[in-house]
Image (tube, rainbow, N blue to C red):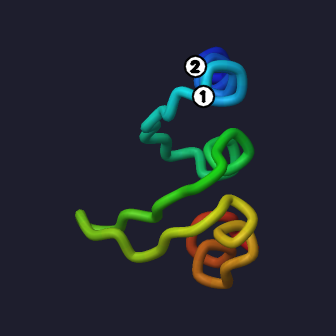
Amino acid sequence: MDDILKVASTLAKNDGISVLLVEQDITKALAAADRGYVVENGHIVLEGSSGELQANEHVKKAYLGI
């Protein structure tokens, strides 16, 4: 998965190509992404920049174990 994240990041930064990536490891996903969406039970429950999602209390409790 790390290789895929590196390629997606390179494509976005160097070539301006948007990449849609579905990843369950939220820590890795937010480290690689500019924006993110949290999907629960088939519905988007949160969206925002990587920083906003990392700071969100729901994300911290439910996905980061904080």
- Rounded to the nearest whole Å, what is the CA distance between mark 1 and mark 2? 16 Å
Quadrant of the image containing the N terminus: top right
Q: Earlier in the sequence, mark 1 or mark 2?
A: 2
Residue on which the image places disc 2 = 4
* Residue found at the very far bottom of the displayed protein: 57
Residue drawn where x is 61% and y is 73% of the image: 59
Q: How many marks?
A: 2
In screen coordinates, is 18 left or right of 54?
left
Q: Residues within 10 Å of mark 1 (few under 14, many from 20)?
A: few
Residue drawn where x is 72% and y is 67% of the image: 54
Secondary structure of the residue carrying numbered label 1? loop
Q: Position of residue 21 (x, y in %)?
A: 46, 37
- Residue 36 falls in image quadrant: bottom right
Residue type at tag 1? Gly
- Residue 65 falls in image quadrant: bottom right
Residue on which the image places disc 1 = 16
Q: Who is closer to the viewer here, 18 or 57? A: 18
Quadrant of the image containing the C terminus: bottom right
Secondary structure of the residue carrying numbered label 2? helix
In screen coordinates, is 45 left or right of 25?
left
- Residue 45 falls in image quadrant: bottom left
Q: Position of residue 55 (x, y in %)?
A: 75, 75
Q: Nearer the viewer, mark 1 or mark 2?
A: 1
Relative vertical location of residue 50 with respect to residue 46 in this rendering, above or below: above
Whether pointer 1 and pointer 2 mark residues with C-beta atoms closer than 8 Å, the reply is: no
Q: Position of residue 51 (x, y in %)?
A: 75, 65
Relative vertical location of residue 50 with respect to residue 3 in this rendering, above or below: below
Residue drawn where x is 69% and y is 39% of the image: 32
Q: Who is closer to the viewer here, 44 or 9? A: 9
